[in-house]
């Protein structure tokens, strides 16, 4: 296999096929498994000595040269270099012409320190990689630039996915950028208009089918066999190639230090799988001397991976998902095997967190000036639990993956601060200490007469209240 | 004056004061005028020969050295270098310690080409500088990183503004980042919760006063005289220092080519003033050989600058503002004199556009995969008018300034695509051609039975419809 090319390998039966042999539904015809993209270096063993500068693939620049090249590209004004995904193109040779990739200048997302959240969780060194700062407001953009570039270079004119949320927004934006037509399939019935607003803005066609979500996926699977529509659901392995690049970006931002622990929200589970692939490839190529642990956090109401993790028989059973963190409201995650392998191979954990824990964590992250959607906040909530369980120690450097922007779900924020997010029964479950924590973070507007003396008095009383730690 | 320091100069009576002498309401005690920040080079005449590499300020690196320095910093992992504002800190020496600036990694916003929008408007070369890709989703972040850094380094613990929109979101985020407390003043009555969601998320205290917006500004002016609250309304001249940096970034992204024309939405008018200042300073320092024109576009229902522009007596009369483009719904713009000077000195125009023209332009920008809030879309709508009037020719390179992200106003997008944005009376005003343009862009969801044959038939019929040009 040439270094600048790739194959596809079934993650279940390990059958390897060329990129031109893949079926339109991206499922292995033998075992129905998902594919992953493999390269010349995919099965390389990492150099035995940590920090060894050379890797065994002489056609690829060595580790130092790659680091230098990636840094140099940050100063370039070419759009392929300005993309935080394609800047690392040496490790995702999935298209024929890099100068024609479909990009919105995704990636390049900030790595924020969260000193107060870290202190609250009991660790000294907490960072957040904010993937919600991507062009459409979620981490899905890094995957869509990859998969849409493949679609465009293979001559497709239509792309489609079944999704109402961040995936449809990202797909629609990149399809529009490429001049392709995009179709979003959703179950008929309760449309969440807010979640569709971006797909409509970017010109996607939305089709509501008289069936449920699984029915939509099935129809879409039928359609791509009959009509040249490129499938962009999470089974598409090229999306993960884009989604692995935040791992590269993160260690580059840390001057090639490797954090001890990455904490990722768990919904469809493709994100944890992709980040694990990114770190593993860097390790194989000698770019980093060791691997971080990757832990996955799920909401209690959408916790199939957590159940698998604590099940001594390791059986995956889909659940009926229910959580206000809509981006991870997934009961039957397509990529669970890939994520499970990452947890096992890199040595992380899986935890679940309650609705109230998510809301508190989101407000704590917000109070550091960093806004995220509820699903992102499971990471901080889960971190607290992992520290309490002794799985993460105070000296470890931890990076939380924030997956979406706070503007993705304004209503959640509004309901929280108006104290209308939870039912009375839920509120009754909180301890007095937790009630106080929520009260210190909640900021409902106050009403005053237009009199500066009255306002001053209110401020002085407010000033004496403790700030959230 | 030392090159690394600055003074403040009244934009009306030209009185110059030191930074320590400024009143807490940032108004000139003589004439109530607004201040601008001035530096050693502020009154320099540009070198007579275009492209002359040297400027007269020997303490500042020369133009080539500045360009090189700014490019080098893009490869740095220091947070002050990763900021798209502070990377240009040589031209905004407004704080004592650059290593302690309050930053969320603002700036570094993409410059997108909009080929289909350009073709539709009749020009060959159209770009959009998307300031909505800033951390809180609007251009206000570039100003807030500057003004909050000043506030923090001067030891303030409280900051405040009167705003319900993008300004309050940006202030709250940067205040939280700095560990300061922030207060948002708004008139009591109809709260737009969606617009407040970010300020609450970032932990701001919101106070509703029983008065109108002007009353809020007055109370805030009183308060800052009695209590150490740092005023962050647009009268704060340091905000403009941050907001001038997209001008630097834009020409750097164009490899130091200067576009012929910049088109800016006009609300409070501080943005056009700031961009004008940025270009003028680059010209004075020999960084660019000539100035672009800057044109300002207002909504018909909030058009005080347009009225001033077409008035032969050049009188500014406040209006009662009414437009769905809420970010520019301002009838009495604080910074109008600064913006008017920019239009006059750089030679741009002012135009007004209708509600329907704004909606069409927003959908056209969206169909290129670039989402923006309604106020940003006035730029494309205005460009079409300026081309039709012969003010911009097809060969000129034009940059639209997009000020906010599409997620800032999802409801507008939803209403548009459901055809519920306009009243029947407004719809009746559209020509048949305009109705067809809107119909081609509107994407209301369609409902189908879960049958792949039916779906295929629907797609084939959709495929035969023309795409928006």
Image (cartoon, coloured by chain):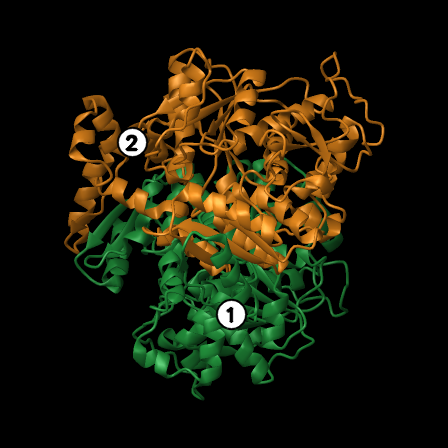
Chain colours: A green, B orange
Q: Residues within 10 Å of mark 2 (few under 14, many from 20)?
A: few
Chain under disc 1: A
The front one of A243 and B56 is B56
Residue receiving disc 2: B467
Q: On the picture, is A46 further left or further right than B125?
A: right
Q: Is residue B41 above or below residue B45?
A: below
Q: Residues within 10 Å of mark 1 (few under 14, many from 20)?
A: many
- Residue A84 image point, x, y percent: 58, 48
Whether residue A236 appears in this view of the structure is no
- Residue A393 image point, x, y percent: 65, 79
The front one of B63 and B20 is B20
Residue found 72% across the figure and 53% down from its top? B100
Tag of residue B37: none
Q: Is residue A402 above or below residue B307?
A: below
Q: Residue furthest bottom?
A: A312
Residue receiving disc 1: A379
- Residue B285 image point, x, y percent: 74, 24
Quadrant in the picture for the C terminus of chain A: bottom right
Res B386 quadrant in image: top left
Whether residue B109 appears in this view of the structure is yes
The front one of B32 and A198 is B32
């Amino acid at each position: 296999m040439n270094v600048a090319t790739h194959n596809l390998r079934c993650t279940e039966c390990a059958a390897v096929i060329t990129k031109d042999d893949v079926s339109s539904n991206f499922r292995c015809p033998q075992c129905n498994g998902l594919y992953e993209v493999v390269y010349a270096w995919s099965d390389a063993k990492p150099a035995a000595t940590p920090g060894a500068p050379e890797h065994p693939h002489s056609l690829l620049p060595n580790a130092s040269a790659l680091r230098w090249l990636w840094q140099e590209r940050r100063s370039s004004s070419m759009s392929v270099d300005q993309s935080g995904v394609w800047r690392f193109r040496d490790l995702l040779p999935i298209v024929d012409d890099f100068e024609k990739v479909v990009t919105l200048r995704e990636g390049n997302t900030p790595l924020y320190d969260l000193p107060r959240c870290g202190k609250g969780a009991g660790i000294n060194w907490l960072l957040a990689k904010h993937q919600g700062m991507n062009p459409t407001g979620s981490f899905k953009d890094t995957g869509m630039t990859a998969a849409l570039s493949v679609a465009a270079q293979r001559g497709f004119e239509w792309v489609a996915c079944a999704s109402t949320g961040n995936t449809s927004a990202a797909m629609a934006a990149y399809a529009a950028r490429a001049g392709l037509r995009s179709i979003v399939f959703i179950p008929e019935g309760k449309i969440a208009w807010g979640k569709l607003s971006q797909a409509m803005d970017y010109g996607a066609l939305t089709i509501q089918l008289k069936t449920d979500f699984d029915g939509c996926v099935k129809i879409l699977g039928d359609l791509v066999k009959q009509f040249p529509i490129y499938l962009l659901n999470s089974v598409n392995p090229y999306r993960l190639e884009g989604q692995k690049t935040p791992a590269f970006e993160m260690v580059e931002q840390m001057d090639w230090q490797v954090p001890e622990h990455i904490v990722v929200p768990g919904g469809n589970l493709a994100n944890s799988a992709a980040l694990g692939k990114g770190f593993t490839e860097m390790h194989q190529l000698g770019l980093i001397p060791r691997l971080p642990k990757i832990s996955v956090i799920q909401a209690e109401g959408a916790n199939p991976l957590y159940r698998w993790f604590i099940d001594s028989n390791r059986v995956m059973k889909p659940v009926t998902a229910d959580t206000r963190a809509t981006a991870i409201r997934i009961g039957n995650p397509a990529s669970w095997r890939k994520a499970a392998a990452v947890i096992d191979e890199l040595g992380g954990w899986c935890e679940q967190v309650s609705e109230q824990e998510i809301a508190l964590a989101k407000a704590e992250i917000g109070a550091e000036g960093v806004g995220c959607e509820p699903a992102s906040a499971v990471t901080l909530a889960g971190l607290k639990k992992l520290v309490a369980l002794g799985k993460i120690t105070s000296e470890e450097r931890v990076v939380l993956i924030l997956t979406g922007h706070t503007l993705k779900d304004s209503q959640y924020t509004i309901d929280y601060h108006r104290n209308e997010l939870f039912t009375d029964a839920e509120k009754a479950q909180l301890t007095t200490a937790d009630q106080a924590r929520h009260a210190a973070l909640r900021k409902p507007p106050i009403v005053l007469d237009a009199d500066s003396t009255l306002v001053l008095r209110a401020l002085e009383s407010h000033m004496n209240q403790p700030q959230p730690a």
